[in-house]
Image (cartoon, rainbow, N blue to C red):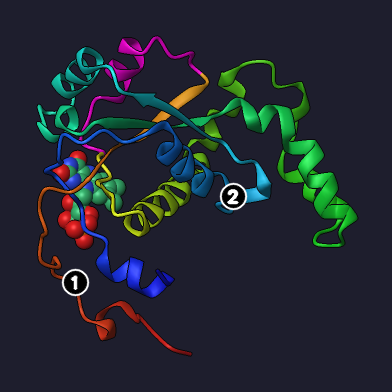
Amino acid sequence: MDVKTAIMARRSIRKYKQETVSEQIINELLEAARLAPSGTNHQPWRFIVVRDQKVKLQIQAVAFNQKFLSEAPVLLVCCADLMTYAKNTRKRLEELIDAGVMGPEAFDSYPGLDEAKDVEAVKGFIPHAMLNVALAMENIALRAVSLGLGTCIVQLMKAKKIAEILELPNNLVITALMPVGFPDQNPAPRPRVALEEIIYRTI
Ligand SMILES: Cc1cc2nc3c(=O)[nH]c(=O)nc-3n(C[C@H](O)[C@H](O)[C@H](O)COP(=O)(O)O)c2cc1C
């Protein structure tokens, strides 16, 4: 399937068949996530693969009871690991400076990062980290379409409560949930604004 076909065929799927999704398929999806681009190549995405029905129901309960979360055979909890920024920033910047992409003044933008020992020091990276995880999630969504699977990005949820349920360390920040399964519905395309509306200006 070419990229345009996958983009056009993708829908948010909220009804899934009970058919199981193999570990091999989930690994295919996570491999697509792994290959996504990320700022300074930090690759902050981390995933919790939830198959346990009890855990899915607990998560659903703190996600406005969106029933398809527990009906999907697999629920991905998509997170950003903030500590990747503390651990890797100097190394990644050095790679970019060595490659001639930027000058050594790039270090000035990240004062004290090397000394960051805990998550408090890197909290400012949360929006950046979330953006990177979102790119990985779109890769998952499109790869899923190419494998005949459906997904839905779900952000209406209480991230802190889910982190408690999963006993996540505080360096993992939940970006969104992603149920995965074989679609049991075939929704029509949802409306989109016209191209002219999204081109704010051409200069
Ligand atoms: C950041 C984000 C958060 C979303 N959160 C939810 C959600 O909590 N529940 C839900 O059912 N759909 C959610 N969606 C799916 C959107 O409703 C859906 O993408 C939109 O209506 C367009 O439909 P389509 O994906 O089928 O093209 C979310 C999508 C995105 C990108």
Looking at the image, do the residues carrying marks 1 and 2 touch, with CB atoms under 8 Å apart? no
User: The disc labelled 1 sits on which kind of residue?
Assistant: Arg
At 11% from the left and 28% from the top, the residue drawn is 64
Locate residue 85: give its quadrant: top right
Q: Which segment did they paint magenta?
A: 155-170
Please state the horizontal and vertical placement of residue 91, each as a whole percent of the image: 81, 38
User: The disc labelled 2 sits on which kind of residue?
Assistant: Ser
Please state the horizontal and vertical placement of residue 143, each as a whole percent of the image: 41, 54
Badge 1 marks a residue whose secondary structure is loop
Q: Nearer the viewer, residue 168 or 127?
A: 168
Classify 87 as above or below 140.
Answer: above
Badge 2 marks a residue whose secondary structure is loop
Q: Is residue 186 left or right of residue 11?
A: left
Residue behind label 1 places its C-beta within 8 angstroms of ligand 1: yes
Residue at mark 2: 38
Locate residue 54: give its quadrant: top left
At 18% from the left and 21% from the top, the residue drawn is 62
Question: Residue 93 in magenta?
Answer: no
Real-space Cα separation, disc 1 to disc 2, in angstroms = 27 Å
Residue at mark 1: 192
Q: Looking at the figure, which quarter contains the N terminus?
A: bottom left
